Amino acid sequence: MRDHALRLQSLSKSFGRPAVDQLDLAVRRGEFYALLGPNGAGKTTTLRMATGLLAPDSGSVEVLGVDMLQDPAAAKRHLAYLPDEPMVYAKLKPTEYLEFVAGLWGISAEEAEPRARQLLDWLDLSQHANELTEGFSRGMKQKLALAGALIHAPQLLILDEPLTGLDAAAARQVKDLLQQHVADGGTVVLTTHILEVAERLAERIGVIRAGRLIAEGTLDELRALAGLGADGTLEDVFLQLTGVPA
Ligand SMILES: Nc1ncnc2c1ncn2[C@@H]1O[C@H](COP(=O)(O)OP(=O)(O)OP(=O)(O)O)[C@@H](O)[C@H]1O
């Protein structure tokens, strides 16, 4: 379906026992979608299959109408993936790293330069543009990895715990960047254990448990599903639906 940024159908993956089990998930273009679930629920495994990094046992993945299994190169061109433990090259400076990643997408250094400058600026890394990343803190590396993920201006951003370990200022910069992406018509899918992030940013929230989507909707819809009133927080909803803490 053209109006879906991401569509997962009957997606399954087992590592001896099922990690993701017949999962159906559809995220519309322009949506900010948060995937929540307790530890080991299958969130990372789902994202790795959605981004073409892990082959599913069965089921299908479509990115902007392109089938990931049939045409992975075309599907991946539409997306960026920020893993939960991103890696940047220690012996490169941020500008060199962004140039390198752009090159992998077939974008020349000259073409990439204005966007690289803008991303470093948005993420408050400009003053470190000429330092080797080996001297960067974890949060700075995480922000640079995000800039690398965005260098080819993808429509769909898929991020695994993008705010974990960031200080308040860095978290704000990343949240602003993600909101700007959606304001510009892009799509964001993220996982988070920081429920306030899902509560404040996400238009729709999916709750996954034991590899299955057990609830989905706006916060109001989830409150109703959990049988809670208007003052129920997402934490109340989460605990009610999953029976375990976030
Ligand atoms: N490469 C692997 N080999 C074996 N088991 C795996 C592998 N990757 C994931 N699993 C298992 O699959 C299940 C789902 O793991 P996954 O990392 O997807 O969960 P998660 O929801 O992202 O958890 P968390 O919130 O702790 O990050 C877990 O039982 C995990 O141990």
Image (tube, rainbow, N blue to C red):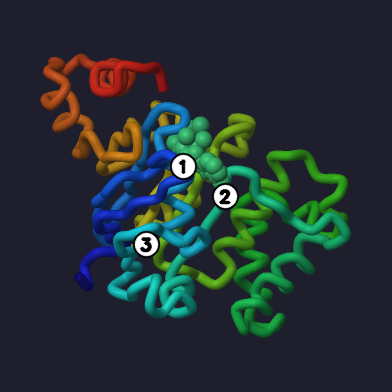
125 vs 135, left or right, is left
The type of residue carrying mark 1 is Gly
Mark 2 / mark 1, whichever is N-terminal: 1
How much space separates mark 2 and mark 1, taking CA atoms? 23 Å
Which quadrant of the figure has residue 71? bottom left
Local SS, label 1? loop
Q: In this view, does 31 lie to the left or right of 105?
A: left
Q: Where is residue 216 in the image (x, y as percent from the top left)?
A: 21, 38
Label 1: how many residues lie within 10 Å, few (<14), some (14-19) or many (20+)?
Answer: few
Report if the CB atoms under discs 3 and 1 are less than 8 Å apart. Answer: no
Q: Position of residue 34 (x, y in %)?
A: 35, 41
Which amino acid type corresponds to the residue marked 3 in the rendered image? Gly
Residue occupying image coordinates x 20% and y 15%: 231
Instruction: Kindly identify which residue carries mark 3.
Output: 186
In front: mark 2 or mark 1?
1
Residue at the disc numbered 2:
83
Residue at 70% in and 67% down: 98
- Asked whether, in this view, residue 96 is left or right of residue 83, the answer is right
Which quadrant does the N terminus fall into? bottom left
Nearer the N terminus, badge 3 or badge 2? 2
Q: How crowded is mark 3: few (under 14 residues within 10 Å), some or many (20 or more)?
A: many
Q: Is ligand 1 less than 8 Å from the beta carbon at label 1?
A: yes
Q: Residue at x 38, y 78 (%)?
A: 70
- Could you tell whether 214 is left or right of 80 in the image? left
Whether residue 192 can be seen here = no
Foreground of the two, 166 or 76: 76
List the residue tagged with mark 1. Answer: 16
